[in-house]
Amino acid sequence: MKYILGSGSPRRKELLGMILPEFTVMPSRFDEDGMQRDGMDACQIVCALSQQKAKEVFARFREENPEREICVIGGDTIVVSPDGEVMGKPSSREDAARMLRQLSGSTHQVITAVTVMALSDGQVMEKVFPVSTDVTFYPLGETEIERYLDTGEPFDKAGSYGIQGYGGLLVERIAGDYNNVVGLPVARLMREMREMGLLA
Amino acid sequence: MKYILGSGSPRRKELLGMILPEFTVMPSRFDEDGMQRDGMDACQIVCALSQQKAKEVFARFREENPEREICVIGGDTIVVSPDGEVMGKPSSREDAARMLRQLSGSTHQVITAVTVMALSDGQVMEKVFPVSTDVTFYPLGETEIERYLDTGEPFDKAGSYGIQGYGGLLVERIAGDYNNVVGLPVARLMREMREMGLLA
């Protein structure tokens, strides 16, 4: 069985390495921005993104290796602000500051949707599951926000923070799975893959 | 101001590095096993341990450098099992297996007590605060326990697991501060030290 991580995130790569000794990284080429989102809630959006990304990688790999048994793991993470806004990556320093002000002193949700798509014994299997974690931020002053922006950490991250880095200093508490906030709920994924017969 | 971490834990050293660019590690020589614990609950025990450890380092450093302004940070972490047993480090592989069976499929508490003891402007300041995080384990089979023991990770850790390593695969969810489970609630510590005027 060949395992493929359909995401270029170094954090997901590190987490997946905890349960798989060997896998290939093949970032998805699915066009996120082109996806229809009308009438979908945050959880439906992130599930669809994760599924479409995995599907694209699965199809691309199969085209070149039609006989090979494969298992593609795709993941997508979004931050839902206390007001219900779906937060992606910030477009600028000012946008990042705006997001952090919105998260300050309150609780938001981080949802990662994982898709496992496999071809095993000639059968295609697919499973999509979302995992949600509540994250509560300390109240943040403008100085603290500016300092955090100066670390450079917010700019490639949904919601403008990374909990595993200096962003952890902004967080008072979480309720749920920690690695899910980092980008991959690997403990749950391990159990799902075992249940599907894709992991010993 | 000279900062001193009064603990030899590499995990605490890494976490403290997030808020202090420079500090000295000076593990405490306080004799834990000799400490009176009669009639104390888990939280009182860990607070006393953290305080006594910091005090010993503070006194030792001051003896040689009586004029120097210093700030000693001490920490101690315990795991309280669902039955209320205070779990330290395991004494053997069998002991580690026993602890993991006790934590399986239920919620326990991890309490880290932090002591900040400083000499600043000729004044001695001291603050001790405990932080508690609830950790819920997945139900663990014997195979999973044996596999985890084989990683070698449990043997130097209170409660026989490390959440930042493969132990994270055993955890379904937490409620509270994650870094507190790792060994130092650094986000809270930063705020306490600022309030004491010991950090900008």
Image (cartoon, coloured by chain):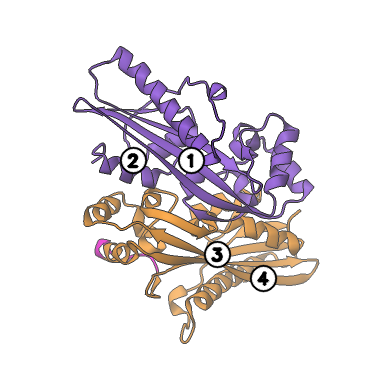
Chain colours: A purple, B orange
Question: Real-space Cα distance between discs 1 and 2?
Answer: 18 Å
Question: Real-space Cα distance between discs 1 and 3?
Answer: 33 Å
Rendered residue at 42%/30% (across/down): A51
* Label number found at residue B172: none
Badge 4 amino acid: Lys
* Label number found at residue B127: 4
> Which residue is the site of mark 1?
A112
Which element is circle 2 on? Answer: loop
Query: Are the two marked residues, 4 and 2, in contact with CB atoms closer than 8 angstroms?
Result: no
Residue B118 seen in render: yes
Q: Is residue B14 magenta?
A: no
Q: Position of residue A80 (x, y in %)?
A: 59, 43
Q: Is residue A41 above or below residue B77?
A: above
- Determine the chain carrying the residue at label 2: A
Which element is circle 4 on? Answer: strand
- Determine the chain carrying the residue at label 4: B
Q: Is residue B34 above or below residue A191?
A: below
> Which residue is the site of mark 3?
B75
Res A146 quadrant in image: top right
> Which residue is the site of mark 2?
A19
Which element is circle 1 on? Answer: strand
* Region of the chain picked out in magenta, as a range: B88-94
Along the polypeptide, which appears first: circle 1 or circle 2?
2
Query: Are the two marked residues, 1 and 2, in contact with CB atoms closer than 8 angstroms?
Result: no
> Are labels 4 and 2 assigned to the same chain?
no
Question: Real-space Cα distance between discs 3 and 4?
Answer: 12 Å
Q: Viewer-proximal residue, B8 or A171?
A: A171
Q: Marks 1 and 3: which is nearer the front? A: 1
Rendered residue at 39%/34% (across/down): A115
